[in-house]
Amino acid sequence: MQRQMHLNLFFHSRGHHEASWRHPASSPLALTDIRYYQDLARRAEAAKFDSIFLADQLALGEDVAQAARTWLEPITVLAAVAVATERVGLIATASTTYTEPFNLARQFASIDHISNGRAAWNIVTSWLATAARNFGGAGQVSHADRYARGEEFMTVVNGLWDSWADDAVADDRAEGIYGRAGRIRPIDHRGDFYQVAGPLNMPRCPQGRPVLVQAGSSDTGRRFAARHAEAVFTAHMAKETAQEFYADLKRLAAAEGRDPLQILILPGLSPMIASTEAEAQRLVREVNELTDPEVGRKRLSNRFGGHDFSHLPIDRPLTPADFPDPGSVEAARSRTEVIVNLVRRDKPTLRQLLAYLAGARGHYVTAGTPEQIADLMADWFTGGAADGFNVMPPLLPAQFDAFAAEIVPLLQRRGLFRTEYSGTMLRHHYGLAWPKSQFD
Ligand SMILES: Cc1cc2nc3c(=O)[nH]c(=O)nc-3n(C[C@H](O)[C@H](O)[C@H](O)COP(=O)(O)O)c2cc1C
């Protein structure tokens, strides 16, 4: 069979553009209204998308005055979305730095049971400096320590998910036996960061383990992904860096003894779609006019671990010297590299840089006709840059509807995307193997 793309819909505010929440074409519902999320997931399912994704941060942004982002707790949202849909995969972010592995293993196993095998966890180590202040206030955990803790975290959760054998539940009413003795066992983990006895307090989940997603891009992040991730989100502003990332991650996965086909690379794509290129560009200008450069400046500062950009003139071309060295940033190091590389290459003014970042925070932003965007997707997909895309519509739901109505049929006609789901679980949609249990 022809290789096909995997498509994920990334939920974010009323769209990924920073000013989407103000735009008349975006949803009228409150961002705390669960119907908004359930409705988006149903639209993704109708378009035969593989999955939907909710990001998360463990602190309120400092830009709340002009930024409509409501961090409804994502695992809770997944439970509500699970009962409103039947097929689409459900991915939520949760942090290895600020969660206990027992809690997390239990929550995602529950979502996998509730959704009949559609749960996935986006593993993050949490880069936000303000999050640390909400968890004991001991200061931000360093980049290296976060990943060291993350490694041990994975050992514990995988152990817990495997602590019930597939046949552990007898549920035999006549004999009076629910759980089979000997088929459920503790994990007795004692490590540097965690002491966890186990077993988990529920049966093995339908997918064996939830699908594991990751989005780290630094060297440490990539090695972590190569060991654990089955799907990888990534941000690129050019096809060349996406190709480099793709090749590197597949190589690293092979070096870990894994089949490179079992790790899907999904770069972000934020397309503004209209019937002509001029109309798409007009829409971009219309949304850009609703942005406030001071909000962008604060966000940039956050990305660079709180670095002060307030002195930078808005209309002078930037140079890499205007930024701290990405290697010294303890926050989201890889995205800072993406930004500094763009500055080196294009020498934008701060105003231009902020307008680009307003589109989708450093992911690939484009505007054009459905044919142009489908061509671009096909080019990345066949050119070793992507196994599919993390679709990030600038306006929700309007620009997702345009994607579903115009681009999906073009991809289907070219044989590049499914016309029907062939399975019920996320592992089926992504073409992933069932994880081998450590039990037997
Ligand atoms: C599409 C995408 C989604 C992400 N979602 C989250 C998120 O929900 N929460 C979070 O703290 N970080 C999120 N990240 C950040 C990554 O997990 C990671 O911390 C960041 O890319 C820095 O990686 P590094 O630490 O390896 O440099 C996301 C990144 C990407 C590309």
Image (cartoon, rainbow, N blue to C red):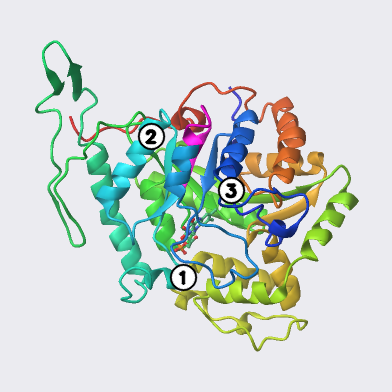
347 left or right, relative to 126: right
**Whether residue 213 can be seen here:** no
- For ligand 1, tell me if the residue under mark 1 lies within 8 Å: yes
What is the C-alpha distance between the residues marked 2 and 1? 31 Å
Furthest residue toward bottom: 311
Front in this rendered view, residue 334 or 274:
274
- For ligand 1, tell me if the residue under mark 2 lies within 8 Å: no
184 in relation to 340, above or below:
above
Instruction: Indicate the position of residue 124 as horizontal and vertical percent values.
Output: 41, 56
- Look at the numbered discs 2 and 1 and tell me whether their residues touch, using CB distance below 8 Å: no
Write down the quadrant of residue 275 in the picture. top right
Residue for point 24% across, 34% down: 202
Type of the residue with mark 2: Asp
Type of the residue with mark 3: Phe
What is the C-alpha distance between the residues marked 2 and 3? 20 Å
Residue 87 colored magenta?
Answer: yes
Magenta segment range? 81-92
Disc 3, SS: strand
Q: Quadrant of the N terminus?
A: top right
Residue for point 21% across, 40% down: 200
**Whether residue 339 can be seen here:** yes
Type of the residue with mark 1: Ala
Residue for point 18% across, 19% down: 170
- Look at the numbered discs 3 and 1 and tell me whether their residues touch, using CB distance below 8 Å: no
Instruction: Indicate the position of residue 371 as horizontal and vertical percent values.
Output: 80, 39
96 left or right, relative to 403: left
- Look at the numbered discs 2 and 3 and tell me whether their residues touch, using CB distance below 8 Å: no
Q: Which mark is residue 408?
A: none
Q: Which residue is mark 2?
A: 112
Which comes sooner in the sequence, label 2 or label 3? 3
Disc 2, SS: helix
